[in-house]
Image: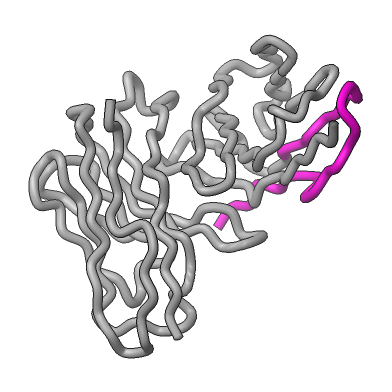
Amino acid sequence: TQLLEQSPQFLSIQEGENLTVYCNSSSVFSSLQWYRQEPGEGPVLLVTVVTGGEVKKLKRLTFQFGDARKDSSLHITAAQPGDTGLYLCAGREDSNYQLIWGAGTKLIIKP
Amino acid sequence: NAGVTQTPKFQVLKTGQSMTLQCAQDMNHNSMYWYRQDPGMGLRLIYYSASEGTTDKGEVPNGYNVSRLNKREFSLRLESAAPSQTSVYFCASSEPRTANTGELFFGEGSRLTVL
């Protein structure tokens, strides 16, 4: 089983601060997805990246796919309490249709 | 839009009891999945159904069975529940435009406690 490691596992910061969450693997992925999950709900897709070096922006969230397609990062600028949640990354290997999931980063933004 | 609907949302079982988790999607998706989520372990795939009439084992299938009743419905059965099956169970569906970029749509989860 290939691993997809997320760091940090837990992050608690003040509103207005910036943060970065990392998703790393030794595997090469054909695509990588980021989901956000709020308490009592299922994960919801934020973005899919498919090209090495790709950068996508979603308002204050910036997602980057590594050049070698083995890692990804999520950067949040000026975090807000509404960003609180569990952030999950999930990658698809070239040879395997199924998603490989990271364990998640629990993010708390304090007002 | 209902999306993916799971029932029940909460269940408490005694060891050895059986139960079925129900899942239905109204997005006309071909693929459906059952995951379990445990603290610090992310989502682990139990079973999936790539299309109506087919089911396949995922990463952690032991102790579970599934039925793809029709295109809309995919149920998960615990024949003899064990405390190790205490978890939050998520059903998901997808219709990938390509094999690489398919988005998974999740239900709200079913929280199961086995005493």
Q: In the rendered image of this protein, does residue B47 appear above or below residue B107?
A: below
Place residue B102 in its image quadrant: top left
Give the magenta-colored segment's residue range.
Answer: A1-23
Q: In the rendered image of this protein, does residue B94 appear above or below residue A18?
A: below
Q: Report x, y in % for residue A11.
A: 83, 43
Q: Quadrant of the N terminus of chain A?
A: bottom right
User: Relative to residue A32, is residue B113 drawn left or right?
Assistant: left
Chosen colour scheme: one colour
Q: Report x, y in % for residue B32.
A: 27, 43
Q: From the viewer's side, name the closer residue of B114 and B42.
A: B114
> What is the total number of numbered labels drawn onto the structure image?
0
User: Relative to residue B73, is residue A39 drawn left or right?
Assistant: right
| Residue appearing at x 51%, y 28% in the figure | A45
User: Relative to residue A12, is residue A106 drawn left or right?
Assistant: left
Q: From the viewer's side, name the closer residue of B16 and B2.
A: B2
Based on the picture, tell me whether residue A3 belongs to the magenta stretch: yes
| Residue appearing at x 85%, y 18% in the figure | A78
Q: Report x, y in % for residue A46.
A: 56, 24
Based on the picture, tell me whether residue B73 belongs to the magenta stretch: no
| Residue appearing at x 39%, y 40% in the figure | B106
Q: In the rendered image of this protein, does residue B56 appear above or below residue B12?
A: above
Q: Quadrant of the C terminus of chain A?
A: top right
Q: From the viewer's side, name the closer residue of B56 and B110.
A: B110
Q: Report x, y in % for residue B55.
A: 20, 54
| Residue appearing at x 58%, y 20% in the figure | A49
